[in-house]
């Protein structure tokens, strides 16, 4: 008679494996059911609580004064709310999604409690955000939105910024002229500004947008390079919209080198360099929709600390209004908050 012991052992083993697979399936289904979906319910689904001992910030470009002020504003508020013992680290992604994903991995490995995220790519950063959430880290998007279930977002009203700049262009051109738009990185702030300026320009049938897709990379070199190319393709240009001040200042340099007079630029940021340009009556930059990066970063930190408290806030999306600064009202502009 053949012994059935080996067969029974195999059967028992398969039963145990089956139970483990079933349990794993239940866990997987449970995670899928309660995982991050929309920002509106992310606060309820998040499990990150407790004191904040370390904060990490990743931004697009720390050579841009705007992001320098974000870093200063964040660190100032972290020390104010958490004390001197709370560590703070700021890094620059260079608008490189892979680099930013690695930076988030480093924050996770360091057991960072709060990540302030200025996404290099609003959609592409989603897997990294989900990984941080799974590690129990609170993630706050700052300046631009981010997919993947961030716990909150603090940004300027970027559509309003584009609309204000567009209205200025239409008014100054009296509704007739050729306009180029210098685009930027694929992030929500840029997309919203483009949508806003296009909506404003569309109100004037006499305005013709001759280019809208050229990416100036959000910096001076990119703005200058794109403007040089646009001047070759479109010699007759009346006005330029640039997605931020560095791009606009680069475009202005290209115009000056090409000895193109009569062309004016509207941009977004309200940076100190833009203030100096507006103070020069011969400079091509004529208007900028001003943000306040220092204050924006402070609000993002406040939201992060509040979300980890015992009574998290109900509102997790904060939009900050902007104002248009021109040569005419420059004397009343107080500039960015700075410490």
Image (cartoon, rainbow, N blue to C red):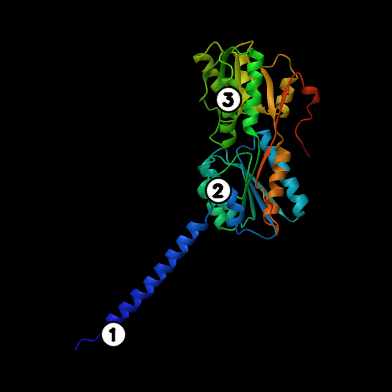
Q: CA distance from mark 2 to mark 3?
A: 27 Å
The residue pinned by badge 2 equals 38
Return the x and y of residue 49 as percentages of the image width and height.
65, 59
- For residue 29, what is the image quadrant? bottom left
Q: Residue at x 49, y 59 (%)?
A: 31
In the visual, does 204 lie left or right of 53?
left
Return the x and y of residue 34 as percentages of the image width and height.
52, 57
The residue pinned by badge 3 equals 199
Q: CA distance from mark 3 to mark 1?
A: 78 Å
- For residue 159, what is the image quadrant? top right
Q: Residue at x 66, y 37 (%)?
A: 67
Residue nearest the viewer, comparing 63 with 101: 101
In the visual, does 81 lie left or right of 175?
right
Q: Is residue 254 visible?
A: no
- Name the quarter where the N terminus is drawn: bottom left
Name the disc covering residue 5, or none: 1
Return the x and y of residue 103 as percentages of the image width and height.
57, 48
């Amino acid at each position: 008679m053949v012994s059935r012991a080996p067969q029974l052992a195999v059967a028992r083993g398969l039963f145990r494996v089956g139970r483990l697979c079933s349990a794993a399936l239940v866990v997987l289904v449970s995670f899928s059911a309660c995982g991050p979906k929309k920002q509106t319910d992310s606060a309820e689904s998040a499990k990150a609580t407790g004191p904040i001992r370390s904060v990490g910030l990743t931004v697009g470009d720390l050579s841009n004064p705007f992001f320098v002020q974000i870093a200063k504003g964040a660190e100032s508020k972290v020390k104010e709310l958490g004390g001197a013992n709370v560590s703070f680290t700021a890094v620059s992604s260079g608008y490189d999604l892979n680099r930013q994903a690695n930076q988030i991995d480093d924050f996770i490995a360091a057991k960072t409690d709060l990540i302030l995220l200025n996404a290099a790519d609003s959609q592409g950063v989603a897997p990294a955000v989900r990984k941080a959430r799974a590690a129990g880290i609170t993630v706050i998007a700052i300046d631009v939105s981010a997919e993947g279930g961030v716990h909150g977002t603090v940004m300027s009203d970027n559509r309003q910024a584009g609309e204000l700049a567009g209205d200025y262009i239409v008014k100054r051109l009296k509704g007739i002229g050729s306009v180029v738009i210098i685009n930027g990185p694929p992030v929500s702030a840029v997309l919203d500004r483009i949508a806003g300026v296009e909506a404003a320009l569309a109100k004037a049938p006499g305005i013709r947008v001759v280019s809208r897709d050229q990416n100036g990379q959000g910096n001076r070199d990119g703005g200058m390079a794109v403007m040089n190319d646009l001047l070759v393709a479109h010699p007759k240009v009346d006005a330029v919209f640039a997605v931020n001040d560095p791009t606009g200042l680069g475009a202005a340099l290209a115009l000056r080198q090409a000895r193109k007079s009569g062309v004016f630029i509207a941009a977004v940021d309200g940076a100190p360099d833009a203030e100096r340009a507006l103070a020069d009556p011969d400079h091509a930059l004529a208007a900028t929709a001003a943000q306040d990066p220092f204050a924006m970063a402070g609000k993002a930190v406040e939201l992060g600390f509040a979300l980890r408290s015992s009574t998290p806030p109900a509102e997790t999306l904060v939009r900050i209004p902007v104002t248009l600064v021109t040569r005419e009202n420059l004397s009343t502009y107080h500039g960015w908050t700075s410490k």
